[in-house]
Amino acid sequence: MFVLTHHAREPVTKQGGTTFTFVTDGIEAALEQARAAAGDKDVALGGGANLVQQYLKAGLLDQLQLHVVPVLLGDGVRLFGNQLGAGQVELVRTRVIESPTGVTHLRYRVVK
């Protein structure tokens, strides 16, 4: 796991063998390290709206998966707000799964 952060730390290995490597030199460096570690496998990004917006703006995402949970938390950053700019990102919905619990899973392809 590669964790994008502003605070340098030594890698942490958890019980079971998962190592968290903290990357402080930007989104491109984190992606490059993740791709090198993954080899020919896919790389997945997990994070909040600010992180997703950075990767979308940089044109570094091929697809986007959103898991919409019907819980109101009060405040946060809009994922598709003015931060991206009008017409800057085009998404095509490729999958929708609705669960009986009210959670909706959406997958989009990022048009490049």
Image (cartoon, grey):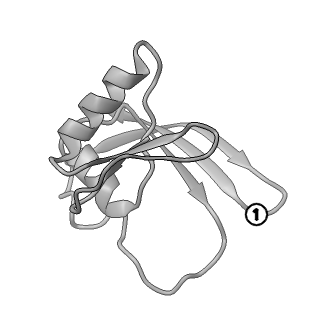
Q: Residue furthest right?
A: 100
From where the camera sits, is residue 112 visible? no
- The residue at 53%/51% (across/down) is 66
Looking at the picture, how far across and down is residue 67, in whole percent? 59, 54
Looking at the picture, how far across and down is residue 53, in whole percent? 28, 54
Label 1, residues with CA under 10 Å away: few <14, some 14-19, many ≥20: few
- Residue 100 occupies which quadrant of the picture? bottom right
Which residue does the numbered mark 1 point to in the structure image? 102
Looking at the picture, how far across and down is residue 30, in whole percent? 26, 39
Q: Nearer the viewer, residue 48 or 72?
A: 48
From where the camera sits, is residue 9 visible? yes
| Quarter of the image where the N terminus is located | top left
Apparent side of residue 100 relative to residue 75 in the rendered image (left or right): right
Q: Nearer the viewer, residue 52 or 90?
A: 52
- The residue at 47%/39% (across/down) is 108
Q: Residue furthest bottom?
A: 74
- The residue at 31%/42% (across/down) is 90
Q: Amino acid at mark 1?
A: Gly
Apparent side of residue 26 relative to residue 70 in the rendered image (left or right): left
- The residue at 62%/45% (across/down) is 15
Q: Residue furthest top?
A: 40
Looking at the picture, how far across and down is residue 58, in whole percent? 18, 42
Q: Is residue 83 above or below residue 94?
A: below
Residue at disc 1, secondary structure: loop
Apparent side of residue 20 relative to residue 99 in the rendered image (left or right): left
Apparent side of residue 109 relative to residue 60 in the rendered image (left or right): right
Total marks shown come to 1
| Quarter of the image where the C terminus is located | top left
Q: Nearer the viewer, residue 108 or 62?
A: 62
Q: Nearer the viewer, residue 2 or 15?
A: 15
